[in-house]
Image (cartoon, rainbow, N blue to C red):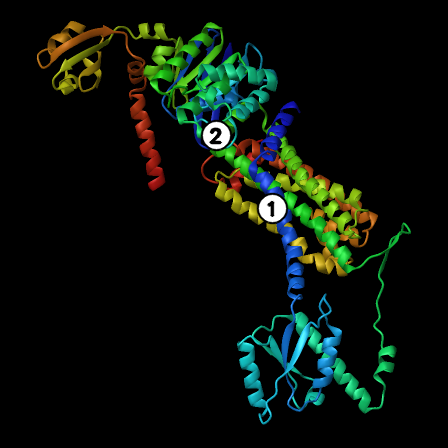
Amino acid sequence: MNKTFVVAKWEYLERVKSKMFIASLFIFPVVMIAFLVLPTLLATRAEDTQKIIGLVDPQDLITPVLMKKIEERFSLKDDRPMYIIRKIEEPTADTETLRMIANSLVFAEDIEGYIYIPPDIFETNQPEYYSTNVGNIQDQGRFTSIIRDILTEFRLEERGVDPNIVNEVVKPVNLRTVRISPTGDERESDFLTIFLSTYIFLMVMMMLIATSGQILIRSVVEEKTNRIIEVLASSCSPTDLMAGKIIGLSALGLTQIGLYALMGLAAVSYFGFEGILFENVWLLLPYFVLGYLFYAAIFVVIGSPLSSEQEAQQIAGWVVLILLLPMIFAVVAIENPGMPIVRILSFIPFFTPSFMALRIPIAMPSTFDIVVTMGILILSTIFMMWIAGKIFRVAILSYGKRPSFGEIWQWIKAG
Amino acid sequence: MIEVKNLYKTFSTINAVNGVSFKVEPGKVFGLLGPNGAGKTTTIRMILNIIKPDTGEIYFDGNPFDRMIQNNIGYLPEERGLYRKNKLIHTILYFAGLKGISSREARKRALVWLERFNLTDYTNNKVEELSKGNQQKVQFIISVLHNPKYIILDEPFSGLDPVNQILLKDIIGELRKEGKILIFSTHQMEQAEKMCDDVCIINRGRVVLYGKLSEEKKKFGINTVLIEYEGDGSILERMGGVKRSAVYSNYAELEIDSDVKPRAIIHEASKYLDIRKFEVMEPTLNAIFLNLVGASVEEIERKDRETQVQEVTG
């Protein structure tokens, strides 16, 4: 135990102080925030300026209404209208010519783009929008809804119905979703809340397993290539060494996660987000810890026979892929947590931690499922650790070419 | 005392160690000798309990290996290994910690050793910033910092410059005086000859010679002559009465038949060469090895390398 602690302390302290670790600590949240915040920030910035939109409506079918409505409905923060509609007119020109003029205005960047109202708009319901950039879904969505409203009003008036009455009658419905649980707990919740909280949990778990797994492999490989392992093996047992590494590196991972959790909580309380589900944390935690140990053992099994950093990185990448699988299922599982495939996969120890992490926040699985998956996971973790110990013992002293499966099998039997 | 009894170890098809037995006594330098690949390192690893022997026993002052003994062994491996990115002092403290020495005590001792090896300026440097020779000195410090009773040094002199070789030799001498149990493993017979009290020479996993160095030499009798000369020495190889010869550009070591008198040799040799020095001496370890095995250490190692190359290319 004592030597395990010495190894754990070394692995933890030497890494936690390293520049790499401190840098990665800040890079990850910065990147995350950049991904979350920058697009919205940029989008709102773009909304600060007025856009000039051309309108080609040769028959003058909806021009006045459109101009009025669009300016009324969308305005910037400073109350100026968001869009200025410039009618493209030329006394004797036909439609083609008008479009040519409009095109040249777009190319000259005098206008952002232009809306074309074809003469048969009332039959086809199909206005057109031309621009060098048709990627601004928000603008296009606004134009579509305005034109749809205008067309609807025209049709209602044709039939002698007052549009105001219709507006009063046709009101949008908002479905309020409430999540209930047998404990009598009720709270407003929605897809996004569940999705986010589950996703964050999965992400954190994957990150911890992947990063510390990679560090674990690389540290073993480094000790092998530098032959440090000889001195270590003469000073402590392979079990001390393996256990020390796993403990030290999980402490490292937990430090990282802990700091992120603090940052996250700070953000939550500052921005007043709600609904990140912490209530199941006591059930999720054992899955998390067991899953971590299970994968740590796998990384040891895979990593300790290797002799070069490149090999180590490649293989670590493959293991991370297994971890990614639940992400694919996340959306489906949230929509339908009772899906047989999700249930079946959660009994396979490789996937148990992540799939249970998916299932628990969405709809509490049956006690049977929890007990059995936990049991399987505990047994397979113990088994994996046992195998890892056997392989580690021999693998750390084998250099050079990668051992075959047959050889590794011999090691397991011999130890 | 370390007692090694009848060790056997087989790796897949190779009998790496084949019935090796010896005793290492305190206050003496014990040489574990033989060509590279003879089984020295495997034997050492079994003593260190890094690998388990197939059969055979190892006792430390009568006791089998345990944690107490592990903390009481110092090991300098043949292929040196240190963490590259970590500070020198941290690395030393870590290895001392693994041997059960508290950080405070370890730091105190480390500073003394660093001073002795002229490394004080590098205390807070990263290991990779040190020269190869300096790294080697650090590795030696790690092997003795916890003041172990049993010390195993595998090729401790390789890579050290002459000044540091002398320093290390002095320190080994001190450890010997302190009554440490010292195993010194090398394939350089000349080196061993100057250092060892007792020797155990192994070849292909078997002990070919074991005993007190001076007595073993006597056993082989006075049958070696050394000649320093000017001229073409190749004649010496073909001279009558010469059993084996090692001829260099201006001196030769000749092992002569036991019924041949040394003066017959000088008489014959002086016909062809200008003799500058003629010495009748005890056989060197090299000569003894040659006699026992039928090939010199260098020849065996060269042959091994060639077969390895053949295995790789063929």
Say which element carries label 1.
Answer: helix
Q: Is residue B230 visible?
A: yes
Task: State which mark lies toward you, 1 or 2.
Answer: 1
Residue extending farthest bottom = A92
Task: Specify whether A208 is left or right of B77.
Answer: right
Using the image, determine if residue A56 lies above or below residue A12.
Answer: below
Q: Disc 2: which chain?
A: A
Residue extending farthest left = B271
Query: Could you say where residue A255 lies in the image, as x and y percent from the top left?
Result: 67, 37
Disc marking residue A227 = 2
Task: Specify whether A74 is left or right of A305.
Answer: right
Q: Residues within 10 Å of mark 1 (few under 14, many from 20)?
A: few
Q: Nearer the viewer, residue A167 or B62?
A: A167
Residue extending farthest right = A184
Q: Which residue is mark 1?
A: A27
Using the image, determine if residue B259 lies above or below residue A256.
Answer: above
The residue drawn where x is 61% and y is 33% is A389
Please identify the quarter of the rendering in which residue A11 is found: top right
Q: Residues within 10 Å of mark 2 (few under 14, many from 20)?
A: many
Which amino acid, by three-letter code, is at mark 2?
A: Arg
Using the image, determine if residue A88 lies above or below residue A319.
Answer: below
Please identify the quarter of the rendering in which residue A239 is found: top right
Query: Could you say where residue B270 lies in the image, as x and y percent from the top left?
Result: 10, 10
Q: Disc 1: which chain?
A: A
Using the rendered image, report if marks 1 and 2 lie on a common chain: yes
Task: Specify whether A33 is left or right of A166.
Answer: left
Disc marking residue B13 = none
The residue drawn where x is 14% and y is 15% is B239
Q: Nearer the viewer, residue B98 or A48?
A: A48
Using the image, determine if residue B71 lies above or below residue B174.
Answer: below
